[in-house]
Amino acid sequence: MGLDFIDSQSTICAQATPPGRSGVAVIRMSGPDSESIIKKLAPKLKKPLESHKLYYCKLVHPKTKEEIDEVLVSFFSEGRSYTGEESVEISCHGSPTVCSKVLKSLIEAGAKTAGPGEFTYRAFMNQKIDLVQAESVLSLIESHSDKSAALALRQLDGQLSTVLSDLEDKITYLLANFEASIDFTEEDIEIVNYQAASGSVSKILESIDNLLTSYKSGRAIKDGVQVALVGKPNAGKSSLLNAILSEEKAIVSDVPGTTRDVVEATIQINGMTIHLFDTAGIRETSDQIEQMGIQRSEQTIEKADIVLLLYPADQSIDQMDTQVFEKYPNKNIHLVVSKADLTSQSTQNKSEYLEALYKFQDKPDNQDKAQDKVLFCSSVSTGGLDQVTSLLNDYSKSFHFENSGILQQARHFELLSVVNGHLERAKDLIDLNESAEFISFEMHEAIFKIHEVLGKRFDDEVMDRVFKEFCIGK
Ligand SMILES: Nc1nc2c(ncn2[C@@H]2O[C@H](COP(=O)(O)OP(=O)(O)OP(=O)(O)O)[C@@H](O)[C@H]2O)c(=O)[nH]1
Ligand SMILES: [Mg+2]
């Protein structure tokens, strides 16, 4: 994107609602000339506009005086708007022609088209929000599930920013002590109690570790959970996908190798987005297109949070299945015995499947948990999906964010991992009774990185990364 579009002296405008027809569309304007520009389009608005008031008026082209629309104008004075600048919002009729005329007239009257995310960028530059909150605006706009919207809203509310500022304060306090002790090294006065400081750093590291661990949940809440349906050709993967969706989404046939490309579908369970991926059956083949499909199946396994490895109840596990366990020993793999209607479940030997799986994966100490790894399903009989749906149900319920801050952005995770590294080194130095200068250096670096997360320090690269995802009008 580049930030060359930024010129905070200008007044910008853009449509805030999506393009297309709607009852009402909203056009936003922000910048020092907002009031004077809207008055050029609405000559009847003579008196100074009052903040947070709605004005009903007719808009006309500033030069030709052609009538454009009857609209509602809301006015926000400088310091009392989203961007912190004087701003106007025009609610006009939601016709693309009307919106385009309003925007053209605003530009004729002196406004310029906003760049992607420029309204939020200005809010950040005017210290209305920090960078973490700016990112949450985008997350909220893009949220596709109840939980992702709720989490983004919390971040916008400043919950994560507060947790990070609190960490910053604690590190700054320790740093101040170590820096003070640098000045007194000659005089043999003990300013810092190294043992107490080590304990304090451990506590901070614990909080950071909690945040870093929370990223797995945060990412799943934000982006959804990825579930891969894999297994041999004809195992019943596409049938299972269709049965879960109650829709004939993927082609089903008794010809092995029917599915070639990955078929994706999305469902919502307990406020979470679940992405289901039906894949090409894995087998040895000389067919080049099928080989490409199998490669995609493997890529899907790599990205997946849960892998459902299907194999039909009337067959036993073979080398193709165990290869998946062997190749992905750390994946959350569940064995799904498909077509369970073809044989009686009681004749199935669960331990045989478990043995095959736990040859390559760590067996949980809890026996029930170990047993839970095998599910039976039938895509054709009543209640045949119960075990699969309850697995997805339980999994989607396992994501919480009631209490502390939770990370959902890769940028935050990366930077806090660096903070963690600096503080671990600081703690090692403290425990070795090293000089306060070295310890202070690590703490300084840690604080710099927290500043980068919050946007107290930033450069074009950071801004580009944050704002490149935004669309115009946000
Ligand atoms: N009896 C029974 N037949 C099933 C079940 N699920 C699938 N089948 C049949 O098994 C055959 C293969 O089903 P698909 O869903 O296409 O299998 P797939 O794993 O997607 O196969 P590929 O795309 O070739 O890898 C079809 O004839 C289905 O009707 C089931 O639960 N019970
Ligand atoms: Mg298929």
Image (cartoon, rainbow, N blue to C red):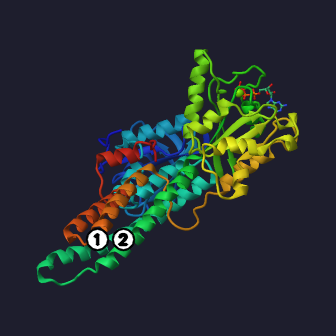
Q: Which residue is at a point 28% across and 71% down the rendered structure image?
A: 430
Report which quarter residue 5 is drawn in: top left
Residue lying farthest left?
186
Question: In front here: 150 or 277?
Answer: 277
Counting from the top left corner in percent of width and height, residue 283 is at: 65, 24
Residue lying farthest top?
287
Q: Examine the rendering and report whether any part of residue 51 can be seen.
A: no
Choose the circle earlier in sequence order: 1 or 2. 2
Q: Is residue 426 left or right of residue 83?
A: left
| Tag 2: amino acid | Val
Judging from the image, what secondary structure is the residue with disc 2 in? helix
Give the spatial CA distance, label 1 vs label 2: 9 Å
Q: Quadrant of the N terminus?
A: top left
Counting from the top left corner in percent of width and height, residue 459 is at: 28, 50
Q: Of tags 1 and 2, which is closer to the observer?
A: 1
Counting from the top left corner in percent of width and height, residue 297 is at: 60, 30
Please say if 454 is above or below 201. Answer: above
Splitting the image into four quadrants, where does ligand 2 fall?
top right
| Tag 1: amino acid | Ile
Counting from the top left corner in percent of width and height, residue 170 is at: 35, 73
Q: Is residue 81 left or right of residue 181?
A: right
The residue carrying mark 2 is 201
Mark 2 and mark 1 in contact (Cβ < 8 Å)? yes
Crowd tier of the residue under label 1, counting other residues whose Cα lies within 10 Å: few below 14, some 14–19, many 20 or above:
many
Q: Is residue 273 left or right of residue 28?
A: right
Q: Which residue is at a point 32% across and 58% down the rendered structure image?
A: 449
Disc ID at residue 430: 1
Q: Which residue is at a point 75% across and 47% down the rendered structure image?
A: 389
Q: Which residue is at a point 50% across and 64% down the rendered structure image?
A: 405
